[in-house]
Image: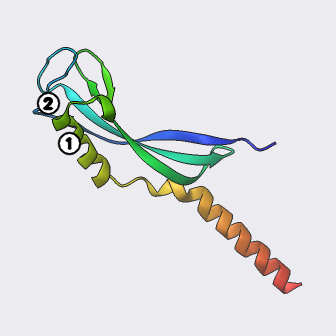
Amino acid sequence: MIIFGSRSVYVTSKQSIGSICPSCGTKGSLRLIVFRRHVHVFWIPIFPIGKKGMSQCQHCKNVLSIKEMPESTKKECVALKNKTKGPIWQFAGLGILILMILWAALITNIK
């Protein structure tokens, strides 16, 4: 039995100063958040498969995906998403897999 799937992990966030919440109209209350998705096997991350951006109003707690954001906020969120690099530990499973393959190759060459 192999347990596999995907999971999103928080990477970074930034307070948007000039943006206005489309839900409650509060200025400067939007927080832009970036998550990174990765594939995992037995909860060990193998490799990242993409980033996702969203915003949350600190006043009314309304959450918007990039598709739902106003154009100015969308540009700011996409820029943050493109600038952000994911954590290196999301490649841990891939590194373990490569080490296991090298170890198996070494063992078979010794015999």
Snapshot quadrant of residue 69: top left
Give the farthest residue toward the bottom.
110
Q: Is residue 85 above or below residue 8?
A: below
- Residue 76: which disc? 1
- Mark 1 vs mark 2: which is more N-terminal? 2
What amino acid type should be assigned to the residue bearing mark 2? Ser
**Is 75 displayed left or right of 47 in the figure?**
left
* Residue beneath the point at 57% across and 57% down: 92
Q: Which residue is mark 2?
A: 19
Provide residue 89's location: percent of width, then percent of height. 50, 55
**Which sits in the foreground, 88 or 17?**
17
Tell me where residue 94 appears, x and y as whole percent.
61, 61
Q: Residue at x 14, y 30 (%)?
A: 19
Marks 1 & 2, CB-CB < 8 Å contact: yes
- Residue at 30 percent across and 28 percent down: it is 68
On the rendered structure, is 2 left or right of 15? right
40 on left or right of 16: right
